[in-house]
Image: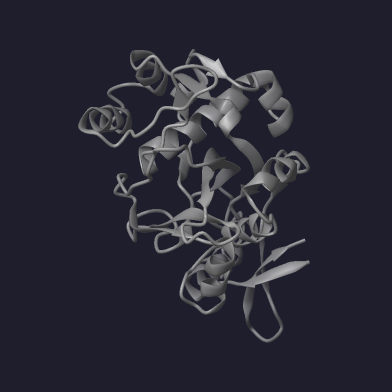
Amino acid sequence: MTSFAAPESIAAHARRFYAEGGVPAPPRTAATVLLLRPDAAGRDGFEVYMIRRAATMTFGGMYAFPGGSVDPGDSEIRLDWSGPGPADWGNRLGQPPGPAQALVCAAAREVFEEAGVLLAGPDHETVVGDVSGEEWERARQALVNRRTGFADLLRDCRLTLRSDLLLPWSRWITPEFEPRRFDTYFFVALLPTGQVPRDVSGEADQTMWIRPTEALARYEAGEMTMLPPTIITLTEIGNCPDLAALPAAAAGRDASIPVMPRFAQAEDGTSHFVLD
């Protein structure tokens, strides 16, 4: 059993929820992506792209990874697709083919909307390069504002979704006492050559590249606030010696099994998130 100290603001809300006999809200399906790159200083290992959610957002002030809810359009689109098909993804994620496709599309769409990184290419073997120019930014804004769909964007740009660039990693469900809950599938992806993540979503007030071990050290020092899914995921990917080891590590995981932290109050009055 693993436990994490719960911030007092969250603990107070949890105690009130249980005292009042609260009814858990149904979780929304979501996807999040850990973008990884070689260490910029040339050291062994790698870095992960992290954002700090703006105070106005759900889980504001918490460090996390780019991601968001599955949109209805993610399950309706028809697009050129490279890599494992929806049925194969369904086997990996424990979902029927349609919802599995929606999760993969949501992961690729969200990482483009929030970080300006596009996991697509002109064919099944290549990836588009720099997508930070004005024309690309107009396309991204149209996607964010729902003036166009993700499939439309890829079709207009004659691009193929590279689902093979995503690796399924884990699945986390928000604790039952939270008013907004998510059933989130975590993916990992290498940053495509020539692309540079940037804070374009307005949902973050800080972004950074950081080694997983350094992020965890800053969490322990009280310098970075994170929730259990982020802490555990950083620990897990930090156990990989290099980027080359990630595919095998991902293949050995079952991303269909959900993990949901539960709230516990210790005899000394301290509050914790507990993972059984």
Q: Residue furthest left?
A: 134
The answer to whether residue 207 is left or right of residue 13 is: left
| Count of numbered marks | 0
Q: Residue at x 49, y 49 (%)?
A: 180
Q: Nearer the viewer, residue 246 or 271?
A: 246
Residue 178 pos. (x, y %): 53, 56
Give left or right: position of 268 versus 129.
Answer: right
Image quarter in which the N terminus is found: bottom right
Task: Give the quarter of the figure containing the C terminus.
Answer: bottom right
Q: Residue furthest bottom?
A: 268
Q: Is residue 148 left or right of residue 167?
A: left
Residue found 64% across the figure and 59% down from its top: 238
Asked whether residue 16 is in view, the answer is no
User: Quick one: 94 or 105, which is closer to the camera?
Assistant: 105
Q: Is residue 192 visible?
A: yes
Q: How is the image coloured?
A: one colour
Above or below, 255 against 10 in this view is: above
Give coordinates of residue 201: x percent, y percent.
Answer: 32, 45
Where is residue 104? Give x, y as percent: 56, 30
In the rendered view, would you say 81 is above or below 100? above
- Residue extending farthest to the front is 42
Front one among 104 and 20? 104
For residue 36, above or below residue 19: above
User: Residue 136 in the image: x percent, y percent?
Assistant: 28, 29
Displayed quadrant of residue 265: bottom right
Question: Which residue shows up at 61% across the image and 22% down it?
Answer: 83
**Depth check, front residue: 149 or 266:** 149
